[in-house]
Image (cartoon, coloured by chain):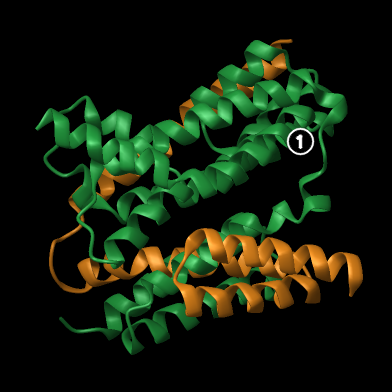
Amino acid sequence: MTEAWTVILGLTAGTFLIRLSGVLIGQRIPQHGAWARGLRALPGCLIVSLVAVSLMAGGGQEWGAATAALAVAGLTRSLPLTMAAGIAAIWLLRHFA
Amino acid sequence: MARSRLNEAWSGAHEIAPLAVGVAIYGLAFGLLAAQAGFGTAQVGGMGALVFAGGAQIIATQQVLAGAGAVAAIVAGLVLNLRLLLVAASIRDVYAGRPWWQIPLGAHLTTDENWALMLAQRAKGRTVGFWYLAGGGACLLGVWCASTVIGAAFAHSIPDPKSLGMDFAFTAAFIAIARSLWKGRDDLLPWLTALGVVTLATHGLGLAPSWGLVLGGVAGAVMAGINGDD
């Protein structure tokens, strides 16, 4: 099936180019000043955006589970426990709420 | 030196295990989707190793399945992957001064999950870098390829991630990682800016989530750049 290979190779080339550009652009951004401050803040802002996008795609149950996950994250600072709490909360809310 | 690199890569590979479980569940689901779209086993495994971006693979394959054509499928996948440019740029010290061959290797192995995990470990005070990222990425690559191929082969007995609550695994993981990255009041304004711009872009302007994500991240960073002082 040629369409599948077209899609695979197109995504391969494009995705690699995006990743490599990110690496190369990062190297060229100034080490001090506003650009450097912005770049240091970027990871947190991206992660907040990732969470926001996925919660907006959901509804009240997702927001409820996110609150539970945030509480566990605050108490434990543990990645596996937070994941377990979030998955358990969404499962319970979907099945029983 | 070779020994400490290996140790760091091994730490990255096994500490990513909780996220790798989520990746495996999604791999099975993607295998099923790819089989429905008529992809063969070699195509599913090859796509996983070459593209190595789960969300983009899912979106592109959905487009193929919907009959949208190869170009639309590629564009949809690449728009979602634009965030990886920011992801890679944001950890520039990891790639700085590396031998030339490590740059494409590290770039290809950079994903949301191992990037975020490395940042969370750094926030805890650990000095992890290139080999931690690469070890985690290599582990995820293996898990992703294997699970997608298995999913395609056993397409009939794959559970829906949503019915298990596993669709929430990454949201919960990123909540945990955001908590680790929170350094205090200086983060408040950039983070609220990111949140506001994501809301405005997706709800207000009706843009696709892929764009909302990129715009939110950039807007928060710009706010930090303009507003902060060193």
> Residue farthest to the right?
A96
Indicate left or right for B105 with B100 as reference.
right
Indicate left or right for B174 with B98 as reference.
right
Spot occupied by residue B168 in the image (x, y as percentages of width and height): 68, 59
> Residue farthest to the bottom?
B185
Vertically, is A5 above or below B11?
above
Indicate left or right for B44 with A26 as reference.
right
Q: Which residue is mark 1?
A: B63
Q: Which of A91/B186 is in front?
A: A91
Q: Which of A59/B180 is in front?
A: B180
Vertically, is B33 above or below B163?
above
Quadrant of the snapshot with the N terminus of chain B: top left
Which color is chain A depicted in? orange
Spot occupied by residue B155 in the image (x, y as percentages of width and height): 82, 25
Q: Residue at x 73, y 77 (%)?
A: A64
Report which quarter residue B100 is drawn in: top left
Indicate left or right for B177 with A88 as reference.
left
Task: Look at label 1 and name its amino acid.
Answer: Gln
Spot occupied by residue B85 in the image (x, y as percentages of width and height): 40, 48
Q: Is there any visible trace of residue B86 in the rendered image?
A: no
Spot occupied by residue A46 in the image (x, y as percentages of width and height): 46, 64
Q: Residue at x 32, y 36 (%)?
A: B10
Q: Which of B19/B205 is in front?
A: B19
Q: Is there any visible trace of residue B206 in the rendered image?
A: yes
Vertically, is A10 above or below A63?
above
What is the chain letter for disc 1? B
Vertically, is B169 above or below B36?
below
Label the green chain with its letter.
B
